[in-house]
């Protein structure tokens, strides 16, 4: 075969030859490095990286580029984002209250797993059952956040059991979709209409996830734990002293709130009135602390007088002095609390000691329990192997058994479903177009033998994700030009035969990332809590509870889109307009729309306007004094390539349209930068 081909191309070329279609030629080097960088890192290459690759004439230059990009820490961010779509990751609980949650450590775990090339079988086991592994580590438990990404309803008066059941349903359906590519959720109310999955088998899968508690895991370092212990001991001593002045208890505060009349509420500050309007189970820790502090302040004099025995040494103090002394204690306690280390927490799963009994829900209604079922898997697939026996009886299968069953080489689905999604990301369309449905109603594979071979190779490569990605991007099929070919319009309008590459509009987060990179503002920090880039005011006017969105400053303002705080009830508008999923359920493929709102966002959104200003300043600072050179430099920063004569002339004309005497100002070049950031090519992977 020609140099540069790999086994993938054997399958693709065989089909093309059958259809008498010639493949496209290889894309030019500038396009190749930009395509590869965007696919593997979600970031464009720098001008220096482009020039180095174009000048590198070694036979293995492209493979060297692939290896370098696969070792970048930004690889984990790019592919971690794809996985977080499947995991329905968000920073809030969902439903109408949509309170905040802390689970970003799970996101960090995912990024790190991809960067370390954690084998996909281990990746699966730790997320589904890390807490059940022998000698489970803290990281193993963090991984179980995969199934804590379900929503949590905090409204008053709800049936708690109903929403616990809904979480289990979501976990069952997500597991079926993500790992098996099956619509198992269709069997929740009755036997599946098309696939060989009975309702009983659905609840056998359900039973695996019906035996967990949902704790919050603290992630304190030893130093943090010691510091907190010292501070809490000091606070406890002061709290004990304060009890002589303060008859406070949570019950008393609750009674006070219940007895507040509408007239009394109006006398409180607007901030307190706003907190009181929030249901108790929907209040943030900060809101609860503010309310408690206000209650104590209002009760200060009464508490200072009451409950003091004759043996107390401070009885000699006058009332005013007594109150002043107590205020001093309050301040001391408050100061100590401020010095407590901020210990990260994350949401995890933990197996219950006392198993729940699982029933079939007749008609899918949890209030109509039917037959009792034990954990099990659909009979149409391979048998489930359990850990062994316990007390002379067969051990009850658990999530660890399920996870091992999913990645058993005998399982015909997991490897195929997974490599098909990798193909989808690199070529725009899966070999099986219905990537979330490998059942009888799903699309047939365009290249069934290739799908089988890739799945087998995935297992043979010991489930190495990077090995599979390297295999895909080093194929000649991947390296083809993406130019439209009129002769293919009737034969293969959807490019399923792969006679050319696909042009793919970047995902919402990457649209932000390429703008950050071109402008020079990008903060390359990996991991950490979510951040708050600027967004339009009034975003939360239609939500039940107003959200506190204080735009980040400094380097945090310019983090990658992956780290933007995601409220389920009202995601950042720049994410929504570019088709980011809602994180309510698993997303196996993002839609790609093309709307005027997208162009308006790139032109006028506060964040993108900042990027345009920074890009203008960068052009003026780094390019020479001549307009043509500046235009060419800005063009390369954004698109990697040089402009052609027509493009350069049109940009020159734009500069001439600016007011006389302003052509060297940041304002004039900001206008040009806005045009560059608004180009279709800028937000497209060729």
Image (spheres, helix red, strand yellow):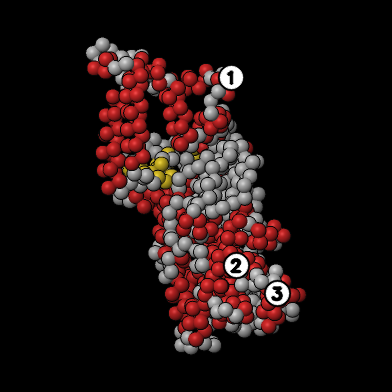
157 vs 208, left or right, is right
Badge nearest the viewer, 1 or 2: 2
Q: Work out whether mark 3 precedes mark 1 in sequence or the reverse, and give the earlier one.
A: 1
> Of 226 and 629, which appears nearest the observer?
629
Q: CA distance from mark 3 to mark 1?
A: 65 Å
- Label 2 Cα neighbours within 10 Å, binned few <14 / some 14-19 / many ≥20: many
Quick one: quadrant of the N terminus? bottom right
Quick one: quadrant of the C terminus? bottom right
Instruction: Estimate the x, y position of residue 263 in percent, counting from the top left.
Output: 58, 19
244 vs 564, left or right, is left
Residue that protrudes farthest toward the right in the picture: 490
The residue identified by callout 1 is 263
Q: Residue at x 76, y 75 (%)?
A: 490
Disc 3 secondary structure class: helix
The residue identified by callout 3 is 656
**Residue 326 seen in render:** yes
Q: Is residue 3 above or below residue 213?
A: below
Q: Is residue 343 above or below residue 448?
A: above
- Label 3 Cα neighbours within 10 Å, binned few <14 / some 14-19 / many ≥20: few
Q: Residue at x 33, y 46 (%)?
A: 220
Instruction: Estimate the x, y position of residue 463 in percent, counting from the top left.
Output: 43, 65
The residue identified by callout 2 is 666
Does the CB distance between marks 2 and 3 fall below 8 Å? no
Q: Residue at x 53, y 32 (%)?
A: 271
């Amino acid at each position: 075969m020609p140099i540069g081909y790999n086994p993938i191309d054997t399958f693709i070329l065989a089909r093309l030859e059958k259809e008498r279609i010639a493949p496209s030629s290889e894309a030019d080097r500038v396009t190749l490095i930009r395509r590869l960088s965007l696919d593997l890192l979600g970031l464009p290459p720098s001008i220096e990286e482009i020039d180095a690759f174009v000048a590198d004439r070694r036979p293995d230059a492209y493979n060297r580029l692939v290896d370098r990009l696969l070792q970048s820490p930004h690889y984990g961010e790019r592919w971690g984002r794809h996985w977080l779509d499947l995991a329905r990751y968000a920073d809030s609980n969902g439903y109408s209250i949509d309170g905040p949650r802390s689970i970003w450590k799970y996101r960090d775990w995912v990024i790190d797993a991809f960067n370390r090339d954690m084998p996909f079988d281990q990746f699966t086991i730790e997320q589904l059952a890390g807490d059940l592994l022998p000698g489970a580590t803290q990281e193993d438990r963090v991984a179980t956040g995969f199934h804590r990404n379900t929503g949590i309803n905090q409204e008053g008066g709800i049936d708690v059991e109903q929403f616990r059941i809904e979480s289990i349903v979501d976990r069952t359906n997500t597991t079926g979709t993500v790992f098996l590519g099956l619509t198992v959720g269709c069997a929740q109310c009755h036997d599946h209409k098309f696939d060989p999955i009975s309702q009983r088998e659905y609840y056998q899968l359900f039973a695996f996830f019906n035996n967990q508690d949902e704790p919050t895991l603290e992630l304190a370092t030893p130093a943090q734990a010691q510091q907190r212990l010292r501070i809490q001991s000091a606070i406890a001593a002061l709290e004990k002293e304060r009890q002589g002045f303060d008859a406070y208890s949570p019950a008393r505060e609750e009674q006070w709130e219940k007895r507040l009349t509408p007239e009394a509420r109006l006398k409180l500050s607007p901030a307190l009135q706003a907190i009181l309007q929030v249901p108790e189970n929907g209040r943030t820790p900060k809101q609860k602390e503010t309310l408690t502090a206000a209650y104590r302040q209002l009760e200060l004099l009464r508490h200072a007088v009451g409950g003091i025995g004759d043996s107390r040494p401070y009885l000699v103090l006058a009332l005013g002095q007594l109150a002043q002394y107590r205020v001093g204690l309050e301040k001391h306690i408050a100061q100590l609390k401020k010095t407590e280390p901020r210990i990260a927490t994350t949401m995890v799963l933990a197996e219950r000691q006392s198993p729940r009994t699982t029933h079939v829900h007749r008609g899918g209604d949890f209030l109509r329990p039917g037959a009792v079922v034990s954990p099990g898997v659909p009979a149409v697939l391979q048998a489930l192997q359990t850990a062994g026996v316990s007390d002379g009886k067969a051990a009850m299968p658990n999530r660890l058994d399920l996870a091992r069953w999913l990645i058993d080489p005998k399982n015909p689905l997991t490897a195929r479903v997974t490599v098909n999604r990798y193909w989808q990301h690199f070529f725009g369309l899966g070999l099986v177009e219905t990537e979330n449905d490998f059942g009888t109603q799903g699309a047939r594979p365009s290249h069934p033998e290739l799908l089988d071979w890739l799945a087998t190779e995935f297992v043979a490569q010991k489930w190495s994700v990077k090995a599979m990605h390297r295999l895909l991007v080093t194929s000649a099929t991947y390296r083809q030009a993406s130019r439209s070919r009129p002769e293919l319009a009737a034969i293969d309008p959807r490019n399923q035969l792969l006679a050319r590459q696909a042009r793919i509009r970047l995902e919402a987060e990457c649209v932000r990332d390429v703008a950050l990179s071109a402008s020079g503002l990008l903060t390359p920090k990996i991991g950490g809590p979510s951040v708050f880039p600027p967004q339009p005011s009034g975003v939360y006017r239609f939500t039940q509870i107003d959200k506190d969105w204080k735009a980040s400053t400094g380097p945090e303002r310019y983090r990658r889109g992956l780290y933007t705080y995601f409220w389920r009830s009202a995601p950042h508008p720049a994410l929504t307009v570019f088709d980011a999923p809602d994180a309510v359920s698993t997303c196996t493929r993002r839609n790609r729309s093309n709307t005027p709102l997208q162009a308006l966002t790139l032109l006028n959104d506060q964040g993108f306007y900042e990027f345009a200003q920074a890009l203008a300043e960068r052009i003026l600072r780094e390019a020479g004094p001549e307009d043509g050179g500046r235009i060419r430099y800005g063009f390369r920063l954004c698109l990697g390539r040089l402009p052609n004569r027509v493009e350069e002339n049109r940009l020159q004309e734009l500069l001439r349209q600016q007011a006389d005497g302003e052509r060297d100002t940041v304002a004039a070049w900001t206008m040009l930068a806005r045009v560059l950031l608004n180009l279709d090519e800028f937000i497209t992977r060729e």
